[in-house]
Image (tube, rainbow, N blue to C red):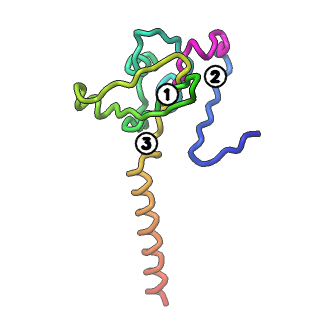
Amino acid sequence: MPKVVPGDVIYIPHQDGNWLDKPANRVVRLMGEVKKPGRYSFNSQMSLLDLLAEAGGPTDKAYIDKIMIVNSSCCGDKSQTFSLRNYIKYPAETPIPMLRPGDTVYVPNEDDSTSTLLRQGLQDAFSFVTTLLVIGAAL
């Protein structure tokens, strides 16, 4: 069994899907916070935006500032991030990453964002301090 650590992504495809009809080198995998995750046929005219549109777009819980693209090639895998929010605000200044057959795209949940993790940490710290103050006042 592989070792699973925090930050790993485990994807379990729908039971009724024909996941092996096309080889991995002819599809792009789309996982995470999109309405229809799965394997999508790829052609050279497709962009990341086409792939997201075909999947029904990001969900309301998607963290669109750090969409991850893993490019697989003979020379090793390379990953990059793409901010859909920046593209929407500044389309001329935000290049769209190239997709190739065999690539994997992951749209994370907003709970994975740095600001959400920081906010949760501050909330936990304030709760701890409040508890200490209440205990100190009771003594």
Residue underneath mark 2: 14
Residue drawn where x is 47% and y is 39% of the image:
109
Which mark identifies residue 105? 1
Q: Position of residue 16 (x, y in %)?
A: 67, 16
Which residue is found at the position 49% from the left and 27% from the top?
Answer: 105
- Do we see residue 56 in this rendering? no
Furthest residue to the front? 75
* Amino acid beneath label 1: Val
Q: Which residues are the magenta region? A: 18-30
Q: Secondary structure at mark 1?
A: strand
Q: Secondary structure at mark 3?
A: helix
Instruction: Report how far apart the C-alphas of labels 1 and 2 lie in the structure.
Output: 18 Å
Query: Residue extending furthest bottom?
Result: 139
Residue drawn at (72%, 40%) of the image: 2
Sequence-wise, the earlier of marks 1 and 2 is 2
> 76 or 125, which is in the foreground?
76
Q: Nearer the viewer, residue 35 or 30?
A: 30
Secondary structure of the residue carrying tag 2 is loop
Q: Quadrant of the N terminus?
A: top right
User: Where residue 5 sits: x, y (%)?
Assistant: 63, 47
